[in-house]
Image (tube, helix red, strand yellow):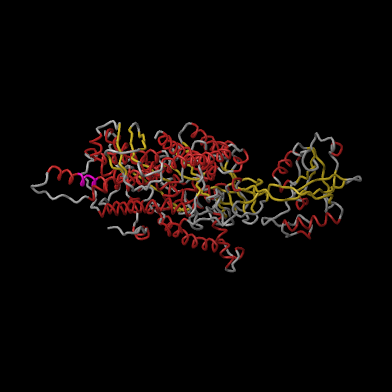
Amino acid sequence: MLDKNFDPKSFEKNFSFDIEASTRKPDAEPFMVLLPPPNVTGSLHMGHALCFTIQDIVARYKRLKGYDVLFQPGLDHAGIVTQLLVEKQLYANGIKKENLTREALLKEIWLSKENSGAAIINQLKILGISCDFSRLRFTMDEDAKKAVAKMFVKLFDDGLLYRGRRMVNWDPLIGSAISDLEVVEKEIDGHLWHLKYMFADEDGYITVATTRPETLFGDTAVAVNPLDERYKRFVGKEVVVPLTDRKIKIIADKYADPEKGTGAVKITPAHDFNDYEVSFRHKLKVIEIMNAKGEMNENVPEIFQRMDRFKAREKVVELLEKKGLLEKIENIKQKVPFGDRSNVPLEPRITYQWFVNCKKLAEAAIEAVKEGKTRFVPRHWENLYFRWLEEIRPWCVSRQIWWGHRIPAWHGPDGQYFVAENLEEATAKATKFYGKNKVELTQDEDVLDTWFSSGMWPFVTLGWPKETDDLKRFYSKMIVVTGFDIIFFWIARMMMSGLYCMGEVPFPEVYIHGLVRDEKGQKMSKSKGNVINPLSLCEKYGADAVRYALASLSSPGRDVKINERIVETIGRNFLTKLWNVVRFAQMNGCLYNKDFEPKKAVSPITKWIVRQVSQMVSDVEESIEGYRFDEATGHIYRCLWNSFCDWFMEFAKPILQRPSPILTDDKPQEACLRLILLKKEIRDAIAWAIVQFTRVLYPIAPFISKKLSGEMGILDMTWPDIDKNLDFKDDVEEIELLKMIISSVRSTKQCLRLPPSEKINVRLENLGSDIESFVSKYEEILSRMAGIIVGEVAGQTVPVVVNGAIIHMECEGKINIKEEKTRLRNEIAKLKRNREETLSRLMNDDFLSKASEEVVQEHKKRVDEINDRIQKVDYILQNLNVM
């Protein structure tokens, strides 16, 4: 017997899904769910909880449907993030990175990875994620290292990967290049300094406006637009770079915008992407004035050397002002590129880096989606995918950090490099190149961008480059579930890598879920104090409640707005209801009977609930197949709470509560047997329905489903085998009529302010079936649930029309007709005023522009509810008017 109180902690910790997740079905159709490997840097957040819950729903559903499901888990080494975190931890303990060797720092990071990785796996299990943890992979395990090296060499040999000296986005805090996609543009309060560049050979000056005065030491030209009449006569003249004695020319270039600043711009090729391009057109000298830390280097006056770039800015402005070279300072809003990991302003920097030419790879990835080989759900995310790939630029894949896949390239004593999968192969290439038997090689210091290895995840986890059975069986038969924010970071790169290495798409479907936000629609962040810890919610309400709440809010293309109250009211309260249903079943001797055949049900109420539950199963199946998880939970909720509990259980209670008859000679045996069989059928139907609920709920809330199905005598979980051809039409219509009569009587009583339990005589008319038979069947239910006694009525009545049938409710002596008419008219008038107020807001452009979508929908819902209430009250009023 279940405990009286629902306490998920009493059973969730007792369940493990490892055996289920690792059991293979070699004869079944293969299906793979690819877990986006979480970073090894910390705990799971609500975004993880949503993503992994959706994936687990799909995986469990497919298992119940008989598929051979591989739910592949993994962890990502998260290069920059992990190294920064460990460096910060070491610094807190008085250890600086500068004082560590590469090997020493990597040892510390590996120790951190082992600790946090184990914690993340435990968190996944707490959430009920049924991965096959016996197959756990790490993006830097030995097999992954070999695969990454092979991929790098393959790209190089095919001419798609190269090393070059280019300008990149440089993160001074990390001390590394980062890709364009790791750049975050932020609008900040800034200044536009107007500087005087004095002519070298004559009096006067040209005013140059800049947001970065500290970079003037790297200036090699001043540019004006060739069409700008103000400056045409100055083109070719020389000016002196302020605070130096160096001369530079004024050049004409279309990059200079006459409408911006003064129309004259300083050109600093080493520290600006646009200036770098200008330098090629005019063959300008390139002067680097900063080091990797964003400090001024030896190419600036000595007083600025080793000074931080922003300190140098202050000093430069101070000296310019003293020398009369600062004309004015203009306050502006400006967009500045920041590193998404370090959150510091980036520097354009010219360095040697490794690049992948993605243009050719992108073409195949674009074509695959256009041809329908891979489908995005929702479809509109394909547009973002196309836009990114069509505008793709060479991908800088090298990073100047230590944690990650080290570049598989070795440098000779003269700088010549040799790309190979290992040192032995590199040595063989170097020996052949130099014509020597012994060549000293040094491996490239850089590591690969984390996304390089993550992009190979679909086939590396299946054994590539080996041609394994798993690779043949599961590749291209998987689904990926993720947020839209990594469509290019991860999805596009998996597509490019998969098509390049395997010749076919890695997955036919990509489901893009929304972002998890707080109840006001704001992004969760520590600074806002609105972060919700899913593990804390699991501890308080149970993992199933968290999963159910997330699923109930998840529909394609929409963000998920959640708070603790939603987990409690939607999640835990629903599961508590299910718990109490099963406890009621146990108290009434309802155990699952495998021989129960729903299609052979006799009682109309049994046939009705069988039809309701069967339809619910079909609806849930259709919703999950279409990734409408909110609809799936809605179907389960409504069927359990409304159809099963509010109606069927109330129909069943009086039957179950009747004392079982004892067969004697003085009692009609047929009637006794009929009641015994009816009670048995009701018990069997209750147990059968509960089992169907636990089965369809299992993908969403596995812990309680496993617990309750066990209580009902079911050990193996399979998807319900529902007969979709049940012909219960007449019986279902009869019960629907019964429901409408009960609901209409209750509503009328409520409108007339009559107590729900007060017994009222009624006369039924135009039922469309034999009235005596109908009353005979449901007399007890009508009395119990509607408080009506069917028979003759006396005096005044209130007629209630239900689907063509008329219920004459006796009201003689129960209400004051005159007072009720007045009250109902007043209520209608008040309802109409409320409706007009609400409609006026909905027609107000100012309100619509400021209100959130949820608030607008609430107002529309309120109008519908008011209209329904007006219709009901007006109907009662019209009936009273005829008296």
Identify which residue, 308 or 582, lies in the foreground: 582
Where residue 567 appears, x then y in whole percent?
45, 53
Residue 31 lies in the magenta stretch: no
Main SS of the magenta part reads helix
Task: Provide residue 670's location: percent of width, then percent of height.
Answer: 13, 42
The quadrant the C terminus occupies is top left
In the displayed structure image, the side of residue 219 where residue 843 appears, left or right: left
Name of the residue lying farthest toward the left: 665
Q: Position of residue 120 (x, y in %)?
A: 45, 57
- Extreme residue toward the right, this view: 203
Would you identify the image quadrant in which residue 541 lies?
bottom left
User: What is the total number of numbered labels drawn onto the structure image?
Assistant: 0
Quarter of the image holding residue 869?
top left
Residue drawn at x 9%, y 49% as measured from the top left: 664
Q: Is residue 235 above or below residue 702?
A: above
* Residue 314 visible, this angle: yes
Residue 699 as seen in the image, left or right of residue 375: left
Q: Looking at the image, which is closer to me, 241 or 529?
A: 529
- What is the magenta range? 678-684
The residue drawn where x is 24% and y is 32% is: 770
Q: Nearer the viewer, residue 86 or 746?
A: 746
Task: Name the image quarter holding the N terminus.
Answer: bottom left
Query: In the rendered image, is residue 408 in sight?
Result: no
For residue 851, side relative to residue 586 (left or right): right
**Residue 734 percent coordinates (x, y):** 29, 35
